[in-house]
Image (cartoon, grey):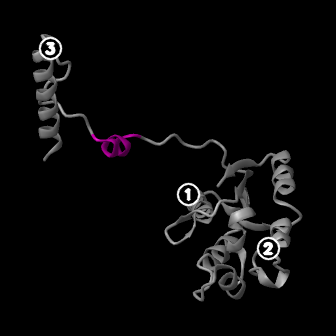
Amino acid sequence: MTTRSKISKGITKVALCCAILGLTVQPSVSQETVQPSVSQELEERIPIPISVRKDIRVVFQIKDDDWKKGIGKGLYYVGKLVETYDSMGIDPKDRSIHAVFHDSAGYWMLKDSAYNKTKGINTGNPNKETIRKLTQQGVSIELCAQTMKSHGWVADDILPDVKVVVGAYPRIIDLQMQGYAYIRF
């Protein structure tokens, strides 16, 4: 059923109900008029440009064990931000992005052996390639030492590209005090 026929059928049902109740219907939109879809409207609109293109500072707090497209959701969206800035021609030297991991998402930072042991599997860490790529693109990937301690992880369990911070909250506060925009996952 097309959008036009759905709208027409809906208007007919409303008119019938109103007639039963003794109400008159004066549609403000003719049955032939179909509103553009949301995707059509978005394609026709010009995105609002960003004004800050230098000294961009962002800190992600990633603590929830949510997934998107086979990797941790927080990692996925850090990657999307980097891709967006790259597509806009913003030089990596003009941005500083930190992703601070703790709590339920901390295990994403583990080497395959520790990841497998933690999850009770033998497939390895699906996040390791994304982490490597993001660090090569200048993103600082950081893991809370308190999360490590609470799970019994040691430095040798952590992927080589991951930095360890004294605590997620002190690190996030410190970065915010330095003017970093805060995004939470």
Q: Earlier in the sequence, mark 1 or mark 2?
A: 1
Report the disc number at residue 151.
2
The stretch drawn in magenta includes residue 13: no
How far is mark 1 from mark 3, CA to CA? 54 Å
Expressed as whole percent of the image width and height from the top left, the position of residue 143 reads 78, 68
| Image x and y of residue 64, in percent | 65, 59
User: Disc 3 on helix, strand or loop?
Assistant: helix
Magenta stretch: give its range: 37-45
Look at the magenta stretch and give its main secondary structure: helix
| Vertical placement of residue 157 versus 103, above or below | below
Residue 67 is situated, as x and y percent measured from the top left of the image, at 55, 65
Q: Is residue 42 magenta?
A: yes
Q: Residue at x 70, y 73 (%)?
A: 107
Mark 3 vs 2, N-terminal side? 3
Image quarter hosting the C terminus: bottom right
Q: Residues within 10 Å of mark 2 (few under 14, many from 20)?
A: few
| Relative height, residue 153 to residue 49 (above, below) | below
Callout 2 amino acid: His
Q: Is residue 53 above or below residue 162?
A: above
Which residue type does callout 3 highlight? Leu
Q: Is residue 26 left or right of residue 143?
A: left
Q: Nearer the viewer, residue 12 or 2?
A: 12
User: Which residue lies under the disc numbered 3?
Assistant: 21
CA distance separating discs 3 and 2? 66 Å
**Identity of the residue drawn at 84% across and 49% down:** 173
Is residue 68 shown left or right of residue 129?
left
Query: Pointer 3 and pointer 2: residues touching (CB < 8 Å)?
Result: no
Q: Which residue is mark 1?
A: 84
Residue 37 against residue 106 in the figure, above or below: above
